[in-house]
Image (cartoon, rainbow, N blue to C red):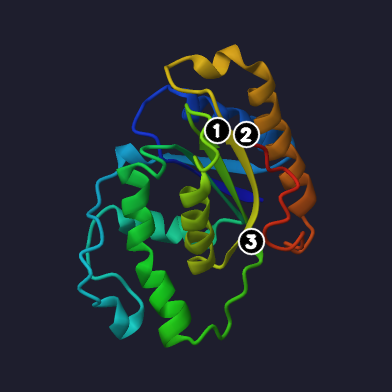
Amino acid sequence: MHVLALNGSPRVGGNTEMVLQHFAEGATQAGARVETLRLRDFTYSPCLEIYACRRDGRCALRDDMDIIYPKLAECDMLVVASPMFFYGLPAHLKALIDRCQANWVRKYEIDGKQGHECTRPGVFLGLGATGGKNLFRGAIFTMRYFFDALDVRYEADLLLRGLDFRGDAQKHPEMLAEAEELGAALVRRFSGSGREGKPPGSGEYSSS
């Protein structure tokens, strides 16, 4: 199983990276091959809304998204880890999501959903500092629609609070253990299973 993990945090070596690493360790121990992309290391434009993609479902902009698009298409499981910025997603991650409008156009306008099934599992690892009840609400909606455009099913999330300054995650080994257990459990569930799992939004692994 090929797991693609996107690190949406602009901070190197921070809490998001640490939680994602533990998820990846669990997935690897369960037999997956995990490929992690730190989005701040790539250079790509935000969507310019020129709708050239309406011709053939392909983005007309040429940049590092040409590297990322095939990886999004070929992975067996997609994991996105991100801190919350103003109750939303940071710019590097949001720009990537917006550039997947081309995928949405291809799926819904060009192909009419023919041949598109959300069989691949998607996971969202969200980290935030505050205790606000709506902290992750907007990000979850965005992730659900992002996953759908890629034919990925929103299978699970892990929502962690109280993580702000560098190193805070180390003070909560139970959170790191939960991320590792989640990675292992999902790989065991979907490896060699024909990508069958629970329906979207099962929330089995969701925490807040």
Q: In which quarter of the image is the C terminus?
A: top right
Identify the secondary structure beneath mark 2: helix
Question: Which residue is tagged 1?
Answer: 20
Residue occupied by mark 3: 120
- Circle 3 Cα neighbour tier, 10 Å, few/some/many (<14 / 14–19 / ≥20): many
On the question of residue 85 being in view, the answer is yes
Q: Which of marks 1 and 3 is nearer the N terminus?
A: 1
Q: What element carries label 1?
A: helix
State how far apart marks 3 and 2 are (Cα).
17 Å
113 or 162: nearer the eye? Answer: 162
Q: Give coordinates of residue 102: x percent, y percent.
A: 36, 71
| Image side of residue 181 versus residue 147, left or right | right
Using the numbered discs, state the Cα–Cα distance from disc 1 to disc 2 in whole angstroms: 5 Å
Q: Which of 33 and 181 is in front in this view?
A: 181
Residue designated by label 2: 23
Give the quadrant of residue 7.
top left
Where does the image place residue 133, in percent across and percent down from the top left? 55, 39
Residue 110, given in percent of the width and then of the height, sits at: 42, 86
In primary-sequence order, the first of circles 3 and 2 is 2
Q: Which residue is drawn at 37% across and 37% down?
A: 85
